[in-house]
Structure formats: C-alpha cells, structure tokens
Image (cartoon, rainbow, N blue to C red):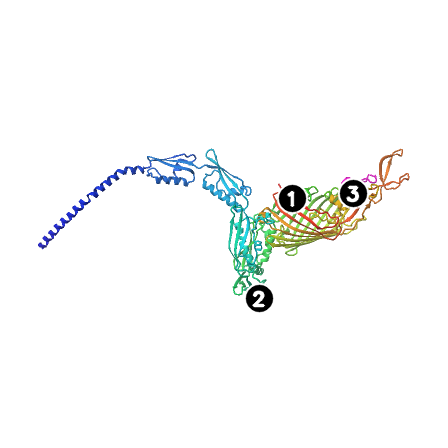
Amino acid sequence: MTGFAIAAGNRNTRTTRLVAGLLAGTIMGSLPTMALAQETSAEEEATQPAAVQQQDVVRTIAVSGAQRLEPQTILSYIRLRPGDAYTQAAGDEVLKDLYATELFSNVSVTNNDGNVVITVVENPVINRILLEGNERIKSDKIVPEIRLAPRQIFTRSKVRADVARIIELYKRQGRFAATVEPQMVQLSQNRVDIVFEIEEGPKSKVRQINIIGNQQFDDGELKSEMVTEETGGLLSFLSSNTSYDPDRLAFDQQNLRTFYLTQGYADFRVVSAVAELTPDKEDFIITYVVEEGERYKFGDVEVQSELRDFDSEALTQRLAMKTGDFYNAKLVEDTVEQMTDLAGTFGYAFADVRPQFSRNPEDLTMDVTFVLREAPRVYVERIDVNGNTLTQDKVVRREFRVAEGDAFNSLAIKRSEARIKSLGYFQENFEITQVEGSAPDRVILEANIEEQPTGELQLSAGFSSLERFILSGSIRQRNFRGRGQTVGLSLNYSGYSKSAQISFTEPYVFDRNISLGADVYHREVDNDYFNSGFSTYEQATTGLSLRAGVPLSEYMSLIGSYTLNRENVSIAGSDFADLDGDGVEECITSRFICEAVGKRTASILGLTVNHDTLDSRLRPTRGETISLTGEFAGLGGDVKYLRMRSRMGKWFNLGSGFIFSLNAEGGWIEALKDNPTPGFDDVRLTDRFFLGEPQFRGFDIRGVGPRIVRLNYLVDPDNPEGPRILESLEDVQNQDNRRFADALGGRAYYLGRAELEIPLGSGAREMGLRPSIWADVGSLFALDAPNLVDNPEGRQLTNSAGEPLFTQPILDEDGEPTGGFVNVTDPTAPDGTPNDPLIGDFYKELFLGDSISPRLTVGVGVNWNSPFGPFRIDISHALIKQRGDDTKTLSFNVGTQF
C-alpha cells in the first residue's frame, strides 16, 4: 500500500508539472489576443457615448401647424411617448400613424436633444360638392353614390373612389367613354369646394355582333332572337338596346340557348361571349362562339301518373309533342305547366310534374317521360289578407273565387288574382301565395297586398285637335272609406263643350254581389265647331242616370239603367228673322237644324249584357270583351225610339311585347213615332249616330256618313249675262271641309279596328312611348233621303207653314215707296200689282255619304306619357272613302297637370 502510494504521488507530481507547463505556454501564446481584446473593449467604451446620443430619450413632444385639431388629439394618434428612446424608426412610425388617419396632407418630425416637434398640415374641410357637365344623369342620381359630403375631411383617396363610382354609373348607362376630372377650389379657413367636371361622352353603341360556329341558322335569324341590337339600323334611333349592357349580353346568351333548344339542338352551348371596346371607347364589338351540336327528335313520349284522377294513357294521347317531331324544350316546359295547372284544378295544390329525359345519340332521339308524382288532394284551410291598412278585408275577400274549406283550384286562384288586380287598389305585381297548412292536405292562401293611393285630385289643361283648348278638374276616390265605393266630381270646359258630373258607385250593396250607381250631370255642346259657323246650334242636356248590375256568371254580368234627360236645342239669334213682319221670328238657317230646335224630355230604359275576360281593364294584353246594349225611349217624355248597340274586343299577347287587338262595334236606332214634317227622317238629328274623329281615325269630326252638301251657282265671268255655272265639289271641299255641308248622322253604323302595339327598348318604355300601327274600317248609313233644293235662279223662301213668301214695298201716306220692304204671303199687292218672290241663295243641294260601303283608313300612332300629361298622335291615310267624306291626316291630343 505504501509503495503504491509513493508511486502515485510521483505520477501526480509529473502531471502537475506538465499541466503547469501547458498553462504557461497557453498564457504566453494568448498574450497578443488578450491585448487585442483589451484594445477592442477600449474602443467600445469610447464609442458608447455616441450610441447613447443617437438614441436620445424623448423628453418632450410638441405639435406645430394644427388648426382644427387639438395637439393632445394629434398625440393620441401616435405611439411615441416621452421617456421612449427616439430613433429613426420611431420617427417613421409617427409619420405612418398620422398619415393613416387621413387627416393630414403633410407631416414632418424633427428631434432636438430629445425635444421632438411634429409639424402637420391638416387636410381641408369640404365646403360643398358640385357637379358640372352632367346632363344625361341628373344630380339626384349621382349625389347618393358619392361618399364625400360637406363638412367632411377632404382626402385624395376618397376623391378617387368617388370618381370611380361616377364613372361606373355612366358605364351602366352605356357611356364607357365618360371621364370625370375632380377639381379643388381653395377657400378661406382651410375649406375647399370639390368640383367633379364630367365629360359624359357618347353612348357606347354595339357596332357589330359576330357569331362564329353557326351552320344551321344565319346571323340575321340569330340576331333577331337577341335583345341587343346593332346600331345603324333603320329604326335603331328609337331603340335603347343598341347600347352595350353586360346584363343584356348574358340575357342574349340565354336567348340563343332557348332558341336552339326549341329547334331540337339539345347539345347547343355558347362557348364564349366577348365584348371588345373600340380604341375610341365609342363602340363595342361583340363576338359569340357557339357550338350547335346535333339536332334531336322526340323519341318515346309518355305520361306516368301516380294520381288516381289521371289516366296515363289518356294524358299521353293528348300530349302536344309526338314521336318523330323535332325536340322542343319550350314545348316540354309548357306541357309541365299545363299538367300542373290541370292537377291544380282537381285540388292537387302541390302536384309534382317532373319530365325525365333519355338521350339516344345513336339515332338522335330524346325520350321524354312526364311523371305525375303522388300528392294529396288539398283543401283551403284559411285565407289571410295581409298589408291592408285602409281597405277592409271584405273588399279583398269577396273577389276570391274560392272559400275556406273548398277544394283547391288553381284556375280559381288565378281568376281571383285577376279580379283583385282589376280593383286598382293594390300593387301591379300582386300574387296570391300558397303556404302549407296544418296538415299535408291543407293549404293557406295569403293575399299579401300593398296598398297604393286611390284618391285622385287632378287639374289639367291642354290642347287637342278635337276641342282646341281644354280645361278640366276632377276629384275621385275609387276606394271610398276602404269599402270599394267610388265617388267622383268632375268639371270640364273647352271651346266647344262644357260639362259637370257627380257620380257614385257601390259595387256590393249590403255585401251582396249587386252593384248600384248614380250620375247627375249637365252638358253643353256648341256644334258651331262641327259646321264652322254655318248652320250652328247648341245642345244642352241635364240629366240623371241610375244603374244596377248583377253577375250572371264569372265572366258575364247584366246591367240595367234608367236615364232621364231634359234637352234643349237652340240656335243663335242671327239665324232667326221676322219673315211675316208680325213680330214672330222664324228660323232661317238650315232647315235640318231648324227641325231639331226645341226642348224635349227623354225617358230611357237600358239593358246591357257584358262578357269580360280581360286580364286588365286599364291596359289589357289578353282576353276578350263583348257587350250588347238595348235602349228604349218612350216611358213618358217626348222622345220615342229603340236603339241597339254592340261592342266586341279581343286582345292577343304575341310575346316580346307585341300586343294585337281587334275591336268591332255597331249600332242601329229606329223611331217609334213618325216625324210630322215631310222630308225629314223620323229619328231626330240629336238622337242619330255620328261617325268620325275620334272614333274613326283618318276622318274629321262627323266626317263620315250622310250629309247635305250645298254648291253655289256662280256667274260665268266670260258670259255675265248667260246662265250660272255650278262650282265643283272638289274645289269647295279643298277650301273648307265643313262650311258647305250639314252632317245629318245616320240610323245605323259599323266600325272595326285592328291595332298592333310595337314594343321599343327599355329607354322608350321608361319614357312611356307605345307606338302602334292600325287600320280602321266602318260606315254610317240608313237615313231617309231628304227633299233637295236646286235653284239656279234663286230659291223662294217660305215661312214655317211652308207658304211661299213675297216682298212688298212699304208706301208712305202719299203712296210713294219709302225704300223699305215687308215680307207677305200674298203674291198680289193691294193695288193688284204682283209682289216679288222672296229669293234666297243660288245653290244646289246634294245628298251624299249615305252608303253601307266601307271606308278604310290606315295609319301609325304613338301614345306617350309625356311630362305634360298623356299624349296621343295619329297620322292617317284614307285608302277607301265615299264622295263627300271629310278626311283628316293628323290628329293629336295632349294635356298637362299642375
């Protein structure tokens, strides 16, 4: 143990010496490194004060240049605080924080030994915003789109955003070349006016439409299916569809697809549709790339009905499409709708009709199976009327064609919608919605109505080719007290007519389906206009009319009426003369007018049968109306006649906005007592029918039908002593169409009208423009031929008893002529000398126009809901007319409200 310990100690001594030697070498080798480290440490200590100087501690922060904002408010926007070390990065953060507020147009930061100064230039406050150059889009449409507003802080980013919004508005209007230049007008107190200078530019039209890939149909046929139209067409100036609209582009793609699907091309697709703006930004070029695919025919077509009330085979036989017909997707949709409606009439409100298709590419056929899935028969659980605040529930409920507890019937629901719409009390898009009831076989019908004003107060003035200046006022309430009653008062005045009327109508008396109405009126008509100062008369009528109506069926009603009129026909005093010298004035104007002079009472019973299936009474687009009216005058009073009238109309919706209508009417009147005056028709002048403007377009007022035309005998300038010559009808008619004739009217007439309403673009529709082309045909006839005068040497006048009149000189006490004359009936004077006959004008009467032969006119017309009121203008041409008729090329009517 001892020896081992000594040996170990010796080894330790040697190890210690070795380690000491190594440490000494290491220390000696590291002396240069340590010296270098000491030098580096000394340099760091020397540079340490400089680093501290760059990171000064912020002592104070001051704000310079603030006007509206408080310095403390500005300091609250930054993160730098006293006591923080100030660096360049910290200064940059201050700039970022303040610019982010968008309150300042310029910011700078300086540091002076820890004293930081922030200098700001505040953005100005907007005083007002002005628009210049905007004519196509009014300011009230642009201002709501602008985010900047008075008293807000001006920033350039907001201005740029508003410029983009205004340009977008113009793009929606098709003006892609529009530019907006914002201007800033400096004001005092750091305020500015912002002026948007707008250069609207022209509408970007569709210059060209290209279609690529169509093989079966040419470009023209496909373009006719599109709403978008190329500019440069004959009538393109009337359409707003020549402007580019992205929504319209998408709609046209769908129209193309629909067209091809109706022609059997089931695989058709629009590969691409690109609209390219020309460099001048004035026009677009639209290119469609299409892939037509193969044309399919109908294969096996059948109906599979799971409803017990429908036989599958019977329905299959009634399908419109047959095997071998070209496939038509529209026909499939129509069939689904028809079968759904058919199921609805049997009470299946939730009938599910689904067409299943099976395409056969090998033989290019399409099998179609219409599956009527099982559905419960449904009953009406409840009818709810919502949204009415004024109108009573019963006013709406009584128009329903189904009642609570009835089986559901889709046709009755549609009829209910039409009847409620026709009231005119609610929104145009009214629909009856169906909601599931408390059980699968129950349905709730909801009439969610939106009331609109039904009171009308109107003052209007206007000018028409019919009555010249017109002034009228009316007040009417079509839903009086919310009961559906109509109360009205109207006053009208024009150069040739005056009227006043009070009316009342109760559509449901005691909540029964019986209507009652009454009118009290007074009318005056000055027929001077119809004869232009020749043979004039005035007709004044005061009367009362009572009416009652009851329904005979859903579309037919019966209306009875009673009218009591007191009529007074008079003529001007200048048309009377004391022919006998006895102080009694005799009528010396047209004998046809004189025959009508007097006061009469007319007591008239009327009965009308109406049939009406129109979808709208205001502006129908489909349906028909038929009415037959009979009137009997003679239940007391002085007038006795029987009069019949009939009117029929049919409207067809041809699609795409085209509305075609056919109208026909006719009348006949027969006197029930003879006229005691020879040579005159038994029906009084004021009871006869008259035809012309405005009923018969293309002819003047009372311009059609029987009339007396007077042609004067003139002295031949080449032979003054010779016989007189008769002026021609054409020469007189060209001078004045009414001064030479008396319109006598007729006892029978017929009139037919055909009219096609032509749709225009959306812009024209917004303006209320509705042009149309039309044709009218009709005639007025069946008047007894009167006794005519033909006196080239002058006509001997007679008194009211028909006795010839003579002129006798007036003598003084000495028997000498005084120069005056008196009219007498004795052809011989007291001294036996003959008296001179009293001679009238030198003329010949012609009886013209009493012909059943048709007159035919054609023309174009435009209805316009102008800012001045309703406006209608017609340009007409008479293709067929009779001798003596008065034609008229242009007629118009316009009014205004104020």
Q: CA distance from mark 1 to mark 3?
A: 35 Å
Please state which amino acid type lies under the numbered disc 2. Answer: Glu
Q: Secondary structure at mark 1?
A: strand
Please state which of residues 335 and 133 is positioned toward the viewer in this rendering.
133
The residue lying furthest to the left in this view is 2
**Looking at the image, is mark 3 or mark 2 earlier in the sequence?**
2
- Residue placed under numbered mark 1 in the picture: 894
Pointer 2 local density, CA inside 10 Å: few below 14, some 14–19, many at least 20 = few
Q: CA distance from mark 3 to mark 2?
A: 80 Å
Please state which amino acid type lies under the numbered disc 1. Answer: Val
Q: Position of residue 809 (x, y in %)?
A: 86, 37
Please state which amino acid type lies under the numbered disc 3. Answer: Thr
Q: CA distance from mark 2 to mark 1?
A: 60 Å
Pointer 3 local density, CA inside 10 Å: few below 14, some 14–19, many at least 20 = some
Q: Secondary structure at mark 2?
A: helix
Q: Position of residue 382 (x, y in %)?
A: 55, 56
- Residue placed under numbered mark 3 in the picture: 589
- Residue placed under numbered mark 2 in the picture: 313
Q: What is the span of residues highlighted in magenta in the rendered image? A: 572-589
The residue lying furthest to the bottom in this view is 313
